[in-house]
Each structure stands twice: as C-alpha cells, then as structure tokens.
Amino acid sequence: MVDTQSYDRIRALPIWQGTISVSPLTGGLTNRNFLVEDAAGRFVVRLGADIPEHQVMRFNELAASRAAHAAGLSPAVVHAQKGITVIEYIEGRALTPKDIRAPEMLARVVAIVRRCHRDMPRHLRGPALIFWVFHVLRDYAATLNEGDSPHRAMLPDLLKTAETLERAAGPFDIVYGHNDLLAANLLDDGDRLWLIDWDYAGFNTPLFDLGGLASNNEFDAAQEARLLELYFDTPPDEALWRRYRAMKCASLLRETMWSMVSEITSELDQDFAAYTAENLARFRTALADFQNS
C-alpha cells in the first residue's frame, strides 16, 4: 500500500530544489525512512513521533544527531521540524554481524564507539537524557502490567534478576552512549565508518554499549575478550568480566522486554511474540553464564 500521506508530507517540505523522487527505505521499527533525491543531492527523511513507552523522544534524537555530526560520527541534519528529520544520504553499505566479528572491522567499530562515548558530550546542546537500562526495565514492567501482557506472570522474577544485575554491574563510569548498536546502524562508505540512528542515545555506562554490541552481533568469548581489550586498552580482569557480563544480561533483558511491550503497543506487522521468545532464550543463556562466572 502506498503511504500517500507520508509522501505528501515529504514533498511539502520547503527545502527541495527542483523535481524530487521519493522512495521508501527498509528497516526502522521506531520510524519510517525514505530516500529523497532532488537537484542538490540525496537525503534520508525520517518520520516519527515520540514513543514514550520506549523512552524515544525526538528532541533528544535530534540533539544527538547534530552532536554526532559535529563530532564527525554521523551525516549532517539538513532540516528538522515536528515529526520529520532530513539527513544527508551516505553512499555506503550497512554492516552485518559477520562483518563486525572480523578482527580488523571490530577494531574500527570499537574506535568509533569510543569516539561516541568520549566526544559527543562536547557538542551536545540543550537538555540531555540518561538511558539507564534498569529504569527502562522497571518502566517496561509497569507498562506490561497495565496492558495486561501475557508475560505478566514472569515479571516479578525478571525484576528481581534486574536488581541483582544492577548491583553487580557497578561501579559505573558514565559516557554518552548510542545504546542501540545493531550492525545496521554502522555504515561503511569504503573509506570510513558512520554511526547512525540516535533514537535511544543518552548518558550511560560504556558497558551497556559493549554488551549490546556483543549480544546483537553474536560474539563468542574470544571476541568479547578482544572487544574489552580494545576498548579499555588492557586485557579484562575478573572484576571487569563480571561487570560486563551483568550489563550484557541487562541489555538482552531490555531487548526482550522491549519486544514484550511492542507486542501490546506496536501497530507494525511484525512477529514480536517470536522475537520475544528468541531474546528471552538468549537472555537466559547469558544469565546462566553470568551466574556461573
């Protein structure tokens, strides 16, 4: 079905030069993305409202996107208004989990993640959010209870586990995190990497991004050890391993409960129940690893 309303909104923007072409882009569960070409070039148009149940606030995404460009991490924002952001198009390919697991690429990915953590606060303007996964989990549980989720019975145990993980993951350093390190959010233009999609950006512990990077891209133990060594410039000791494993579990639990909430709130044609089951199984595997460490 052609989304004529979105096409009309895009065509009505005052920034285009000459005749434009508009085509949908695949991907994106918190927004709709379109490729637009006019006489000046190619652009990505992102359409999306706030999603409070997932802590996605568009003012925060816009501020992070602008800071990321200023830090040399992301393409420029060329226009923004309520519900619409227009970004320069990058000619490149999205990475895959297999790409990221390759040793040379992993080093490049860790370098751009470190730059995000270190450099973003220097360029961020206006109010800034914190993305604290344990608050997110508690808020998700409240949403699931209020929405009569089919998963309500397991929530007390999940929240108890989250409390254990929160205690184990400290002490906490605070950086500015991307907080959604899927392979598709990293682009390679043949010369350099770009980090995109700042929906969940906010101050956080670096271990959340590292745990998310590993779990999203199916790292084995050796790749996790290399990830930590690259990031911290030294092989991980036992204490760091435990903190990291706790935060990796929290990242997987957040993905699981994100999907549970999406089951009862999302209008997208996605099999969120299957995604919940997949991530719940992965969380339980990681939790067993943490408990046995």
Image (spheres, rainbow, N blue to C red):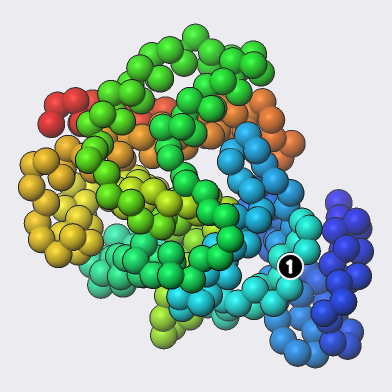
Q: Residue flagged by tag 1: what amino acid is it?
A: Ala
Residue situated in front as seen by the camera: 104 or 237:
237
Residue situated in front as seen by the camera: 184 or 249:
249
**Residue 104 image offset from top left, x and y in percent:** 25, 72
Residue at (19, 64) in percent of width and height = 230
Residue at (42, 37) in percent of width and height = 133
Residue 267 horizontal side relative to residue 128, left or right:
right
Residue at (20, 55) in percent of width and height = 228
Q: What element carries label 1?
A: strand
The residue wearing badge 1 is: 80
Residue 15 horizontal side relative to residue 176, left or right:
right
Where is the C terminus found, in terms of image quarters? Answer: top left
Q: Which residue lies furthest to the front in this view?
A: 126
Q: Residue 21 falls in which quadrant of the image?
A: bottom right
**Residue 280 image offset from top left, x and y in percent:** 42, 28
**Residue 116 image offset from top left, x and y in percent:** 40, 65
Q: Is residue 104 above or below residue 293?
A: below
Q: In this view, does 42 lie above or below 225?
A: below
Residue situated in front as seen by the camera: 111 or 125:
125
Q: Residue furthest top?
A: 153
